[in-house]
Image (cartoon, helix red, strand yellow):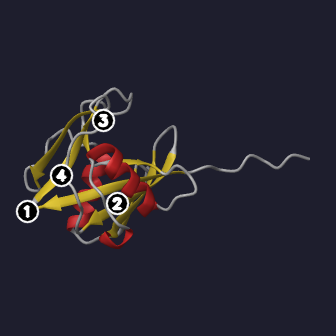
Amino acid sequence: MAEAQRFKIFIAAYLVLEDNGKLLLHKRANSGYEDGNYSLVAGHLDGAETAKHSIIREAYEEAGIKLTTESLEVVHVIHRFSPTREYIDIFLKANKWQGQVVNKEPHKCAELAWFPKDNLPDNLILPVKHALEQIDQAKTYSDFGWQNS
């Protein structure tokens, strides 16, 4: 007898990179998801990698910077519901990095730019905006997209 199909959750890691009161944001393009809106450097875990290793990989692939596991701290986790998928979003803040930020994926990123924390773009993806607000309040966990959250 075949085992019943088990529930599957998706996991994404996000990089909170701050420098002199500014946050690094990524303007999505050609992805089919939230194109034209801003997010953080981010990506799905590929499997057989930790959230820290995932964001180290993504930071280099997307922004050309090198991070270490020691430079990263989990600052927020969201259990997010959408009509098509359920997610665990892990937000990691880097306290140092090597290299200069450069847009290494212009085919998927229309802009990679620093924005003042107190003047972020209006078209910030809603779960990311929510997470940044929670981080500012030193809250490490939240739910997003649930009917009663």
Q: Secondary structure at mark 3?
A: loop
Q: Are marks 2 and 3 in contact (CB under 8 Å)?
A: no
Q: Pointer 2: what residue?
A: 91
The residue indicated by pointer 3 is: 105
In three-dimensional space, the C-alpha distance between marks 1 and 4, rounded to whole angstroms, equals 15 Å
Question: On residue 100, which mark appears?
Answer: 4
Residue 50: % across, % down: 49, 62
The location of residue 117, given as percent across then percent down, is 11, 56
Q: Amino acid at mark 1?
A: Asn
Side (left or right) of 2 relative to 21? right
The residue beneath circle 1 is 20
Q: Residues within 10 Å of mark 3 (few under 14, many from 20)?
A: some
Residue ID at (52%, 42%): 85
Between the residue at mark 2 and the residue at mark 4, the CA separation in whole angstroms equals: 21 Å
| Residue drawn where x is 19% and y is 51% of the image | 24
Q: Nearer the viewer, mark 2 or mark 1?
A: 1
Q: Earlier in the sequence, mark 1 or mark 4?
A: 1
